[in-house]
Image (cartoon, rainbow, N blue to C red):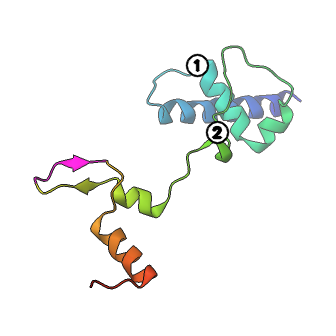
Amino acid sequence: MCALIGNYWMQALELAGNAARDNKKNRINPRHVLLAIRNDDELGKLLAGVTIAHGGVLPNINPVLLPKKTAAKDCCERVVDHNNNPRNVGMLCLVCWFDFYFLLDLSFE
């Protein structure tokens, strides 16, 4: 029993050390212990009901809350005027304008 607990303890400390190194820290703090335990399957199941003081929570952002990006918006945000000054005025860049032109099949008259 003691060997089993020692094995889990050493695994948790090793993973916490890796988490500290990933965060460019020299010391292991409760946050690193929490990240190590919650990101490991076995330790996460073993310590599922445990609260670690000053550990915080795992970073998790619901994808629904993230802003939606469209290809045309990313392209047209970098419109540059004739003096090479960037501007964001909602105008179409040349690439998007040609795509729009050929989609509508317009002609210059």
Q: Which residue is mark 1?
A: 29
Of all residues shown, which one is farthest toward the left?
A: 83
Q: Residues within 10 Å of mark 1 (few under 14, many from 20)?
A: some
> In this picture, which residue range is highlighted in magenta?
83-88
Image quadrant assignment for residue 37: top right
Of all residues shown, which one is farthest toward the top?
A: 53
- Residue 61's label in the rendered image is 2
Front position in the image: 49 or 109? 109
Of all residues shown, which one is farthest toward the front?
A: 109
Residue type of the residue flagged with mark 1? Asn
Q: Sequence order check: which comes first, mark 2 or mark 1?
A: 1
Q: Residues within 10 Å of mark 2 (few under 14, many from 20)?
A: few
In this picture, residue 84 sits left or right of residue 1 = left
Q: Is residue 79 magenta?
A: no
47 versus 68 height, above or below: above
User: Which structural element holds mark 2?
Assistant: loop
Image quadrant assignment for residue 50: top right
Image quadrant assignment for residue 8: top right
> What is the x, y in percent for residue 57?
68, 27
Residue type of the residue flagged with mark 2? Ile
